[in-house]
Image: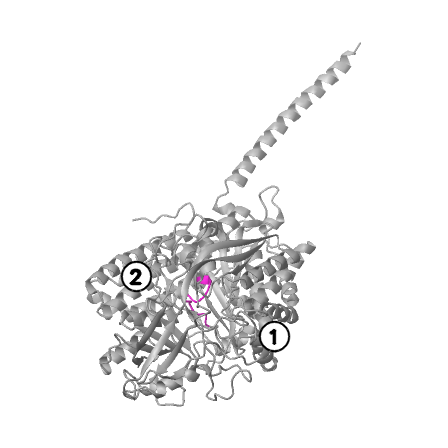
Amino acid sequence: MYSTESLVHRKKQSRCLLISAAIGCVVTFVIGILIGRFATCPDESVEEKPGLYLPGVSEALVSDGDPTIAQELMNSISNDRIRKNLRMLTEHPHLAGTEENLNLAMELKKHWEDVGVDHVTLTPYRVLLSYPNMSDLNYVELLNENNVTKYKSNLTEPVLTPEENKPGVVPPFNAYSAPGDIYGEVVYVNYGRVEDYIYLEQNKSINITGKIVLARYGKIFRGDKVHLAELRGATAVILFSDPEDVTDGDVNQVYPKDWWLPPSGTQRGTVYIGDGDPLSPGYPAIETAYRKKLSPDWYLPAIPCHPIGYGIAINLMRNLGGDVVPRAWQGGMNVTYKFGDGFQTPGWRAHVKVSTSNRNVTIYNAIGIIRGSVEPDRYILIGNHRDAWVFGALDPSSGTAIMMEISRAMGQLVKSGRWRPRRSIIFCSWGAEEYGLVGSTEWVEHYTKSLGARAIAYLNVDIAVQGNFTFRALGTPMIFKSLYDATKKVPNPNATEVSEGRTSVYDTWKMTTPSAEFDRPRITLPGSGSDYATFRDRLGVPIVDLRYTWDPRYKLSAYPMYHSAYETFYLVDEIMDRGFHYHRAIGQIWTEMARDLADSLIIPFNVSDYSTVITSIGKTFMDSFSKIMTDNGIDIGLLEQAISNFTSSVREFENQIQKANLKDPFVVRRINDQLMQLDRAFIDPAGLPGRSLKRHILFAESTVDNYAGSRFPGLSDAITKIQLKEDVDNQWEVVRKHYSVILFTFQSASATLKDVSNFMFSY
């Protein structure tokens, strides 16, 4: 039995326990409310407080990558390995669509698997390419009045070093040229630009209808030369490399003694104006594809075109009749340049024989992916094409050799378990770029939904080293910051410049290529010269193209050996980059940009660079076209206001980033999504007027030069046509409609930078 005292004591214990339990429940309830309030529904004041406040959040989710990895990766890029890679890549010719090109794709696949890349695949596409008839080769000849051949172009380029003596060397030709057997008189048209034809028509009263056009390579894309000639009624085009553009004036100091083009050297290249497979525009050339005739956006010639070296071109020019050309049209051949429109000897004529034909073949892209550790669904793409007209030691294998080394360096760290990037890094080796960006365009079309949602940036190296004077870059504004930061970290490969105090790549780049407006190097807005184009045009992905280039005192449109059989390993190893120091520098820049974009907590995009560029191109546009637009009732002030409003949105967005709590992974993701969406906001799904597959309203290539960039391209195209008196009334309607699209798009882009729960504008 219990005593009375014992019972009282036990009652008191029970009462205390009940009170304690009640207090505990109240405390737990209050804590629950607080957690719910501040963890799941943070307001702006909470967002500004530092520190983790989400329970269980891993520090890895809200941190930048290991900063020591940057230097380790850059230091591991090896000159000798790049050299070894290039020797392998240039052992045989590897034209697109050939077995040799597929063999290189398989080599890359094996390399990536060996070095630790997570996932590797080959993506095939059945596309329309173009090849010469190897049993009936193309040529140009000059016939006398008795139909006897006086001069004839080489069917193949003569072998000048043992390296060129390999099977599979395709003879000089222009891809997608129409076949034909054309006889006639020749008119020399300088570079074959619009302004050259205007000069001929207005100053010399020369009509090229029914004539063969002789044009020197350079200044504009070769396809535009053929297109402009065809529009004016020419029957054929002969393209030649002029010594003024491909030598330093001494035709005896050429390859294999130096990097200058010899008389027999001939530039191959496509004359197709378009991106991707000509028969499946807008959609991938996969097994189920519907194929049709060429898109109205694109151009394939209906007239023959053939390239020759200056060794035969001088004989054509020497026999031309007509007046002597002005000084600006006089090239570097030791002969008096004349307009032609007839030969000095009556009855003489030129003959252009082209047997080139188009056929469907299978090409392959090789793709390797290093999976991201935190955000595997965000992609940093680094790419380079694999196909070459012959050996391609510069274009493109210098870039491929470096990409192989970057993948080795990164894969080794991943394989060791010491590093894995926050975001996925994708290595891309494209097929058939030389024919018109075919492989990359088909892949973008194939995976446009995934890439449109997930791609952060595309980093391209087409030609790593086309000279050894200074670094140069083409790019869109969001990429500027990462590029500048990387070039400041990479040591200058030129020892002489280092001794003079220019210790980084950035230092010489800034000195040799300064911006006209800012205290930094100039980055040129690109045209459509390489695989970056479709990423920009279709997806609105920020892009860059990197390379070392020549001294600008040489007025070159391309490096002298461009697309010739003499673009060999010997040219690179013995003449252009002994020791592969400049190749290594490009590799280090490329590596650091990829790592920076993949590992930084906040994507290193500087949105103020975008507004700066827009302000600059807006001013240039208005300086050129504001008067003609105002005179025709268009309020140019609306564009000025749109640009000003966009700049204000940029400033507000950058201020918000400064206040954001970057320890909240949802805040980080939201900011990065907004950064990703900005370039995409300038994509118009309907495309530019007359160019439905070119969809970026700010940046595209010029319609008269595929290589050159154009700003506000839809408006610029239409107003230029008006100025040339082409379809004036209709073009003014194009201007008015597209102007409204631009104004609307600026508003849309500004909205992407606003608070995500308050993105609409008040009216």
- Distance between the Cα atoms at labels 2 and 1? 47 Å
Q: Is residue 18 above or below residue 231?
A: above
Residue span colored magenta: 522-533
Q: In which quarter of the image is residue 81?
A: bottom right
Name the residue type under label 2: Leu
Task: Kindly indicate whether the residue at mark 1 contacts the one at mark 2 (C-beta within 8 angstroms).
Answer: no
Which callout, 2 or 1, points at the residue further toward the start of the chain? Answer: 1
Q: Which residue is drawn at 68% across and 23% down?
A: 17
Q: In which quarter of the image is the N terminus?
A: top right
Given residues 750 and 130, the one toward you in this image is 130
Packing grade of label 1 (10 A; few <14, some 14-19, many >=20) is: some
Residue at mark 1? 581
Q: In which quarter of the image is residue 218?
A: bottom left
Q: Residue furthest right?
A: 1
Which is more foreground, mark 2 or mark 1?
1
In the image, residue 123 lies at what x, y percent?
52, 53
In the image, residue 292 lies at what x, y percent?
36, 54
Image-based side of 415 in relation to 207, left or right: right
Residue at mark 2? 639
Given residues 72 and 240, the one toward you in this image is 240
Name the residue type under label 1: His
Given residues 748 and 225, the one toward you in this image is 225
Image-based side of 380 in relation to 442, left or right: right
Q: Which residue is drawn at 31% across and 80% down?
A: 186
In the image, residue 317 lies at what x, y percent?
35, 85
Packing grade of label 2 (10 A; few <14, some 14-19, many >=20) is: some
Q: Residue at x 56, y 76 (%)?
A: 164
Report the number of discs.
Answer: 2
Q: Can residue 312 be seen in this view?
A: yes
Image-based side of 3 in relation to 656, left or right: right
Q: In this view, does 481 lie above or below 756?
A: below
In the image, residue 205 lies at what x, y percent?
22, 81
